[in-house]
Structures are given as C-alpha cells and as structure tokens.
Amino acid sequence: MSAIVPKYFTRQGIAPLSKFHPNIQLFVVIPLLADELIFDTLKSLAETDYTKKEQIAVIVVVNHSEVATNEEKQKNKSIFLQLQKGNYPFHLYPIFKNDVDKKIAGVGFARKTGMDQAALFFYKKENPQGIIVSLDADTTVSKNYFTVIFDFFKSHPDAVGSNIRFEHPLEGTAFSPDIYEAITLYELHLRYFVEALRRINFPYAYQTVGSAFAVRAQNYVASQGISIRQGGEDFYFLNKLFDQGFFGEINSTCVFPSPRPNNKTPFGTGVAIKKMLESHKIKFATYNLDAFLCLEEITQKVELLWKTDVQLFLENEITHSVLKQFLKKRDFSKNVEKIKKNSTSFLNFQKAFYRWFNLFTIIKFLNETAETNIFPKEDVTTQANRLISKDLTPRKLLLYYREKLR
C-alpha cells in the first residue's frame, strides 16, 4: 500500500474533507441524493449489536449535479443540516457536494468521494487492512451487520473484500403489490445470472450490488478506486477486485435494499422496476440459459486450452459457430498465445486468461447473441426454473435461490 497509495491520491488530487476520529477501523460510505430514507438507514445502523461503535464511521456524501432540480437541491440542503445535528453511537461525517459538473455527477462520483476519504484516512493511519463498506441511503441492515463484517475480515486476513447477503422486501404495506411482484422478478434475475455463471464454471461468479460489499483499503487503492460512472460503478469496481485474491461472500448477515422505482441511475434496480411498472406488464426478460451453456465450450475446457495448440482448440473444440465467430472477432488465437507465452504454470495461465476472457466479454457475448436473436432473452421465471430443473412460481423460485444456492 505504501508504494502505490501516494501516487493514487496525488494523481487524483484527493485531500481530507473531514477530521476523522483516530480509532476508526471501519467506514460505511453512503451516497445520497434527496433521499430522506437515510434516517431509517442510520437508525438501522445505530441499532446493530456491535458494542464498539466508536470504531465505526459513516460517511454520507450528500450530492447533486449542477442541473439538479430546485426541489432536489433544497431537500439535499435540509438533509445535510439534519445530518450535521445527528446524534448516533458511531461517528457520522456528512459531506456536501453541490452543483457537481453534470459530466461526472452521480452515484459513482458520490461513492468514490466517500471511499477515497476512507482510504486516505487508513493510509495516513498506516492501516492498509482497514475496512470500507458500501451501502445505499435506502438500505437497512440486520442487527449483527457490523459484528459479522468484523468477524469475517478478522478470520480471513487474506481477504481482499467480500459481498454481503442482500434481500429485497417481497411483501408488506410500504409498496404496491405490483412493486413487490416486480422486485421478485428482478432479484430472481440477479441470482439466476450468478448461478448460471457458476454452472459454466466461471471463477468470478459474484453479485455486484452497490449496497452490499466491503473491501480492504489497500485493495481499494490497488484497484484504482471506484469510478465516477453514473451507474454500474459497483459492477466495474468489483470486477477489478475479484482477481486480486480471496474474495468472500458474507451470508450470516443481510442488507435490505429498497425496491422503489426511480431513474437516479441509467440502469439498476430502480430503473428496472420503473420500466416494468410503466409497461403495465410485470415481466422481466433475462439472458437465455442456452447462451450460458454455449460458453461452457470455453469455461469447462480451460485446462485443455493450456495443453493444446490454440488454433487446433478453436477449430476442433468450439463447435458452436456463433461462439467460434465471436472468439475470432476478438483475436482469440493471438491473445491466448500471448497469455501462454507469459505463463509459467496452468494456474498463472488460468488467472491471466480470465483477466482477458472476463465478465465484460461474457456479457458482450450474451448481448450480441440476444440482439441477433440467436439466443433471445426469455422470461426470467422460465430460465431460472430451467437452470435448476424446477417448476416453481416466481416467489418460491426466488426463495429457493436465496436459501439453497448461496
């Protein structure tokens, strides 16, 4: 950390925005845009069972762009003032970023602002193992949230980071029945996608939910921090993190994101729910299972690829013409030969191969085959049932994925 951190902070022009308490061991970073549910979230964090909350800091980055509405600006100002007066058992540090350039404004900018501050603090405290947790303003947590996170990183000193179990509410009176129906389908899509990746033996089959992950400070910086993307910043960051070392999955605590429809980001949960409601048909189309199974010709044969002439492998082992064409367009033979030359063992080759044939490449294949109707997107319930050879209703199916497929 000492070698790369100064360059990271210098290059990005990052300076302290708050004077943090010296005993902090864990930061929770929350981006916020005109969202009063933050007070429910903070209440939830305050009611957790961890007894040493003086070790915890929560950074809330209240932010809006230069083109935000007057209502958003006024609400942000009001929330920020309330946060400044807040009295919580942990350390609370609200940061106000107003009239941000519209080219960079958004959830990525806000999350990065807070996470950079946490990383800078840990660097100055010479604590590269410090923990940075990502959460959202509309997401509550289980009572044992902090206890479990601390225990995980203590018992896994080699962990670069971890996902945290998440569950959207599926019933209640807070939202309409349509919203509960829609979020059931969307969460099913998220879980089906990861389980399909596991089915084909892809090594980095993890959820990438912005309100449900934690990372060590040194690995946050080694990944060059989170990006300022206006959506999907969590996905891009975590995919840079996965191959740094052991990445865990915390399942003994849980976060509960809101299923609210919104358009604060270009894609993600809120937008997906909004689109389903606006279409007046609560349906969700996901990637075709056949497209994943087609990819098995690569992911199940990586060791054979290491031992075999690359061109012969492409011609003889890849039988699906659409996959063969996709690989040829990406100079498969040339790239894999280069990876082989720079690898001294199969394990080195495997890691380097999946750095090239990564999740972005897989999604490109899924999207290309879906758009050309080779493997068209299909109803999520149908595909999720196919994957596990069941015939369940959406709700029962999601519960099965939650409980049986962790």
Image (cartoon, rainbow, N blue to C red):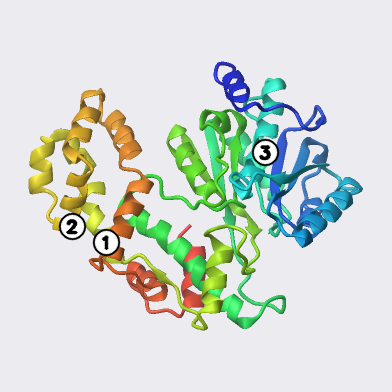
Label 1 element class: helix
Residue 113, disc: 3
Q: Percent position (x, y) of residue 14?
A: 67, 28
Residue under the point 80% across and 32% down: 18
Q: Residue under circle 1?
A: 369
Q: Secondary structure at mark 2?
A: helix
Kindly give the residue lying farthest to the top in the view shown: 3
Characterize the local packing of mark 2: few (<14), some (14-19) or many (20 or more) Cα atoms within 10 angstroms.
Answer: some
The three-letter amino acid code for the residue at tag 2 is Val
- Name the amino acid, label 3: Thr
Is residue 194 visible from the viewing direction of this image? yes
Real-space CA distance between mark 1 and mark 2, rounded to the nearest whole angstrom:
8 Å
Residue drawn at x 7%, y 40% is 312
Please, what is the three-letter code of the amino acid marked with disc 1?
Answer: Thr
Query: Which image quarter is the N terminus in?
Result: top right
Kindly identify which numbered label has been placed on residue 353.
none
Instruction: Tell me, yes or no, if residue 183 can be seen here.
Output: no
Nearest the eye: 255 or 352: 352
Quarter of the image where one finds residue 293: bottom left
Residue at 62% x, 21% y is: 10
**Horizontal placement of 364 versus 47: left or right?**
left
Mark identifier at residue 322: 2
Q: CA distance from mark 2 to mark 3?
A: 42 Å
For residue 136, above or below residue 19: below
The answer to whether the residues at label 1 and label 2 have Cβ atoms under 8 Å apart is yes
Classify 19 as above or below 303.
Answer: above
